[in-house]
Image (tube, rainbow, N blue to C red):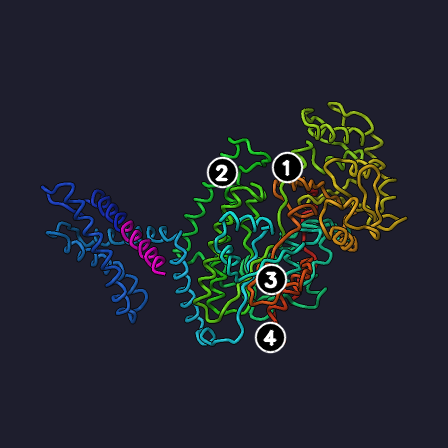
Amino acid sequence: MFKGRWRTAGRALVRVIVVWAVSTLTMLALAGILPDFQLQGTDDSLTRTALTAAWGAGAFGLLSALVWPLLVRALLLVSALVLGLLVFFLNGSLLLVALKLTPAGGGTANAENAIVVAAVMSAVASATSTALAVRDDDAYRRRLSRLAGRRRRRSGQDTAYRRSTASPGTVFLQLDGVGHQVLLDAVAEGHMPTVANWLGERPTHRLTPWRTDWSSQTGASQLGILHGSNHDVPAFRWYEKESGRIMISNRPAGAAELQRRAVEHTRDAGLLTLDGASRGNLFSGGADQLALVLSMAARRGRATRSRAGYFAYFTDPANAVRTAVSFVAEVGREIGQSTRARIRGDRPRVGRGGLYPFIRAFATVVERDVVVAAVIGDMLAGRAAVYADLVAYDEVAHHSGPHSRDAMRVLERLDRSIALLAKVADHAPRSYRLVLLSDHGQSPGETFLGVYGLTLRDLVRAGCGLPVPRRAVRTKSGAEARDAARDAVRTALHRPVKDGDEGETGDEKRSARGSDPIVLASGNLGLISFPDVPERMTREQIDERHPALLRTLANHPGIGFLLVRSEANGSVVLGPAGAEIPVAKLDDTGLLATMGPGAADAVRRTDTFPHVADIMVNSMYDPATGRVHAFEEQIGSHGGLGGEQSNAFLLSPLTLPAPVPGDGELVGAERVHAVLKGWLYDGVGPQIPLGPTPATRSVPRKETEPSAEAT
């Protein structure tokens, strides 16, 4: 304890010294710029001038800290306009007093310059002090606590704040994309000391793995966790034939529609309907307090605005400086890391230029800071349930790899945020249980394009006899995998493709007109839909129209299996060498043997969805290396079956009941919802929302979404 106090005192002393030095340099610079502001006489040496500046800066800082609050309090009855004008004169007066306190009164300034010098020095000292506190979480916590107290007093919430409650509150912190094995590795390697302490020799938490659905991505998982249903969410993005639109989980219109469907399906507003807060999520969970919730982004009105969003956070200058400094540092960090990766020749690797450094900095710094600040406000306000999503790791792991050093550094900073929230709990009006969980993991591997020289869309078009970009067949022959891909394209086209040859005759062009497939990717899960056929196409219909397509896909070395509907056997799973298994007889052997436990049930469930694609494509998975091949440009991916992407975690206090009894398994996001709901409602009685929640309001059924193909 004493060691911690000495460390805190040491950091405070260092900040005082640095602010004093910067203020001294500022005063020297102003003395050189302003003609009527002097720190020396005609015979004074440079050393004496510097000493005078140091004395003046120190005296001004001390007077500002001790006398300024008393002056402001004494003038509270003065009108705001008069006080605003007096501020400048009072600040200038303090500077003149400070100069008189220097040895031999070595500084002089007229009234006008005193006002200017005092204003500049105050601004510089404030910015320096705030910047030095960027890495000081204790100072950050104390500042947010003071701000929360002022907000409560202004809004008249002090009575509710002081009221003690018998039941503890719960904070659910989602570490987006952090798989079960990644968490274990990070703890073992010392990257997450807070979590390691929770799981140490005297554990306070239990770690429970849980298995995602086939669609191992945030849209499906978080919808199931917060709203109890992810029915009919086959992927991150998919095509809906009846409306002719592409649904995308992380678009405001798409998220709002998914939330509406889930509420309609369950007849329940969500996990957070009783005094809940939703922060940084795709969906509201029925919470009344919202910040950065995508499904509500398109809404307008007081009921959907949150007091803890971007605006509220950045109105505090200290927050703005802290986050801005960290943002710039993160941009530089990403540029340095990507440069070193290129120099080392790291493989696999994807492009990380353009705007990506800024996108990464936004996800890992801005969004993290705003969400953590909002959660701190919720805890200090004593809210019963908070669910927040931190996306930092997921963003970095997509481009650097789930086990990369870059991703581990992000986990270190997330661990600091977790420690900060644990400290805040000591100052909250009620006790809090901190629950960590993830929505999915990530599986590593080079992209499908990087290995085989063509995209999934290229391969589908080849199988349909449609024009294929020349890059898809001009692959280098040095890699065996690329040779196999080139052979697959040529086989599908029934003849070699030459320069200037689009691979189809005029008749083929006419027959394919209006029937071009829409090919979408969700990590290593691909979805192929034929928009001109209103219902889900059968295998027989696909074979009649495009005889080579299913064979081309199933035999490609980068593809693990296909799911299609069959008139003869119901839905079937297809694999290489003519392998075919009816879904009704599917188990976790044979074609799905490498995909992990529960794969057959996950495929069977998805097959019942109304909006499942005509052809569902899962990439290969190599259990020896853990590799998959994403159909997007990601070297850490998730969205389908295969490897760590399907293995999420739930880290809960031992004071809560075990998520599953005995050796049972926790399977599916909907089951996780039931566990979390049980924890919230246990011993509290019937849950009655405090008022109409945003999740129960009507959501427009139709929103315009881009209807273009994506890979």
Which residue is the extreme one toward the right? Answer: 568
| 456 on left or right of 141 | right
Residue stretch rendered in magenta on the structure: 1-19
Disc 1 + disc 4, Cβ < 8 Å: no
Residue annotated with mark 2:
337
| 668 on left or right of 180 | right
Question: Residue at 23% across / 54% down in the picture?
Answer: 115
Dot in front, 3 or 2: 2
Q: What numbered label is drawn on residue 284? A: 3
Where's residue 497, x and y in %? 77, 25
Q: Secondary structure at mark 4?
A: loop
Q: Main secondary structure of the magenta part?
A: helix
Label 3 and label 4: CA atoms lie apart by: 24 Å
Residue 708: quarter of image: top right
- Dot 1 or dot 3, earlier in sequence: 3
Q: What numbered label is drawn on residue 683? A: 4
Q: Amino acid at mark 1?
A: Glu
Q: What numbered label is drawn on residue 397? A: none
Q: What numbered label is drawn on residue 446? A: 1
Q: Secondary structure at mark 2?
A: helix
